[in-house]
Amino acid sequence: MSLLFFSIAGSEIFLVVLVVVLLFGSKKIPDLARSFGKGIREFKNATGDIQDEIRRTSQEITDSADPAKKSSKQSNSSTER
């Protein structure tokens, strides 16, 4: 069902571009595109930060829940020295 939503033909894209140009004017479109790009970049950075936090927290929970793994890591690190 979601594939039907994204099946946009070339004439429909042309119509959307034409409406955008008429609404905002050709001088404002680069500024709008730049702002849109900055917004997407900030959103990606925020989602990356959230994913890192979730990974770090889940690793801490896993490490604290499995003390045998933690003690084996400590013994391996002491034998490597």
Image: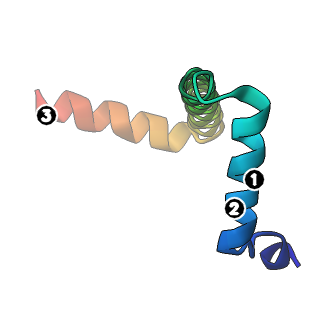
Q: Secondary structure at mark 1?
A: helix
Give the alpha-carbon distance from disc 1 to disc 3, as whole Å: 64 Å
Give the alpha-carbon distance from disc 3 to disc 2, as whole Å: 62 Å
Residue 67: x and y in percent read 56, 37
Give the alpha-carbon distance from disc 2 to disc 1, as whole Å: 5 Å
Q: What residue did someone put label 1 on?
A: 16
**Tag 2: residue type?**
Ile
Could you tell whether 15 is left or right of 44 in the image?
right
Q: What residue did someone put label 3 on?
A: 80
**Tag 1: residue type?**
Val
Q: How many marks?
A: 3
Residue closer to the observer: 66 or 56: 56
Label 1 crowd bin: few (<14), some (14–19), many (20+), radius 10 Å? few
Q: Which quadrant is the N terminus positioned in?
A: bottom right
Q: Quadrant of residue 36?
A: top right
User: In the rendered structure, which disc, 1 or 3, sits on the residue that comes first in sequence?
Assistant: 1
Are discs 1 and 3 less than 8 Å apart at CB?
no
Label 3 crowd bin: few (<14), some (14–19), many (20+), radius 10 Å? few
Label 2 crowd bin: few (<14), some (14–19), many (20+), radius 10 Å? few
Residue 62: x and y in percent read 61, 40
Colouring rule applied to residues: rainbow
User: In the rendered structure, which disc, 3 or 2, sits on the residue that comes first in sequence?
Assistant: 2
Are discs 2 and 1 less than 8 Å apart at CB?
yes
Badge number at residue 7: none
Residue lying at 66% horizontally and 38% vertically, measured from the top left? 65
Q: Secondary structure at mark 2?
A: helix
Could you tell whether 62 is left or right of 68 in the image?
right
Q: Secondary structure at mark 3?
A: helix
Q: Which quadrant is the C terminus positioned in?
A: top left
Q: What residue did someone put label 2 on?
A: 13
